[in-house]
Image (cartoon, rainbow, N blue to C red):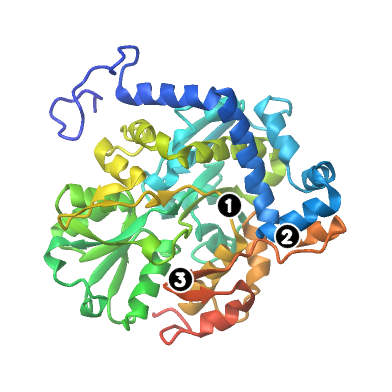
Amino acid sequence: MSAYDPYDADRPLRLGCACGQHTSDAEHAAATLRERSEAPDVVASTSAFIEATLVKALFPQDALRRRFLRAVGRKTAAAAIGSVLPLHALQAMAQDKAPLEKKDLKIGFIPITCATPLIMAHPLGFYSKQGLNVEVVKTAGWALIRDKMLNKEYDATHFLSPMPLAISLGLGSQATPMNVATIQNTNGQAITLAMKHKDKRDPKDWKGFKFAVPFEYSMHNFLLRYYVAEHGLDPDRDIQIRVVPPPEMVANLRAGNIDGFLGPDPFNQRAVFEEAGFIHLLTKELWNGHPCCAFGTSTEFIQKHPNTFAALFRAVLTAAAMAREAKNRELIAKVIAPQAYLNQPETVIAQVLTGRFADGLGQVKNVPDRADFDPIPWQSMAVWMLTQLKRWGYLKGDVNYKQIAEKVFLLTDAKKHMKALGQAAPEGAYPKFSVMNKPFDPDKAEAYAQSFAIKRDARPA
């Protein structure tokens, strides 16, 4: 379809940008963001952000980091941390100092705002700056993403953050070691209900409802199950949960095939835009800062292409740093809205990214952190996901939660490396958090998994 289709209600008819130097507003926005990214202060702050991101994974507690720095001094600390984390390798990648084992890459993505850093790195030239020729490939659904990674058709991909855990464990597929390199987004999901249910806001009234989630091994499935179970409903017996690709969720809601969905944006906002549904709640209200999607690849790819992987890591982290800044969000909405990426009305994406949005119930809300792009793959997040796999019968028997988390979520060997440096080892990257006001302690994962009144020993036949 032409970019200037006069009969597409969702596309502007403007034949160029306001400044007249670009063919579209999207190209103008991309040029503006590229210019911002190349400013000396942004380059410096991006480098600092990347280093801080990695160091934060080693020192999840500020008090521990301060004690370490006071004990050994800044230079010794930087050298010691540099021997553990690929800081110099990442900086070298930015200057093309290390040879890339593979330059032509295919990266899969699902057209949702969760993939913002991975997507925007393409039109903004962050991949090409690293010497990479990356094709970002729009993909129809998560099962296809999984299969293309297993078949090595994709070199790296946009994952739902539980997927690398599931694939590594052989849940739903042949067991193949996968890794989470970065979290793509935190928050950024919602429960959306059909307009006919405006008077059924209490989950206790949802018995018999049909809900959609994008994939079985997803935070969406886990959070929906958690939410309804906390309100006394058994998600396997009192409601139906169906897997529906995100781009098909609004159409299914409008057709009455489902009563609601816990899905990724922009489709919650698209349902409001089309007056097909309303936003019942944002998932940040269940767990503020929860992970959703991730950027990752196979363990084999990392082992065979360490320099290429470092270059990818740098590009995606640079994009994440820009995506976190509120001042960039409206421009990013323009960049990722076109057909090649999300193929959504710009106003829908802008509402999601800026956090100023209509909820479908007549209110305009302002939630700046409705979506965020904190890239740190905390191991406690992975452990929580594993507890939910255990709770709902996907995982059986004894589970070594931390061992699995540390194999799959990268930067997880902090404890071992700190011991090697002669320092008192921290617990690792295992910060505690709460889900619906229930504290989660990753050191007591099995007790947590067994603590729920509603759970499964095995999946229903």
* Percent coordinates x, y for residue 176 in the rendering: 60, 58
- Please count the marks in the image: 3
For residue 229, side relative to residue 302 (left or right): left
Helix, strand or loop at label 2? It is: helix
Give the foreground label among 2 and 1: 2
State the image quarter where residue 276 is shown. bottom left
Q: To which residue does mark 1 refer? A: 376
**Which quarter of the rendered picture does the N terminus lie within?**
top left
**Vertical relation: 412 (above or below) 206:** above
| Nearest to N terminus: mark 1 or mark 3 | 1
Q: Residue at x 54, y 80 (%)?
A: 448
Amino acid on which the number 3 mark rests in the picture: Val
Q: To which residue does mark 2 refer? A: 64
Q: To which residue does mark 3 refer? A: 435
Amino acid on which the number 1 mark rests in the picture: Ile
Residue placed farthest to the front in the image? Answer: 70
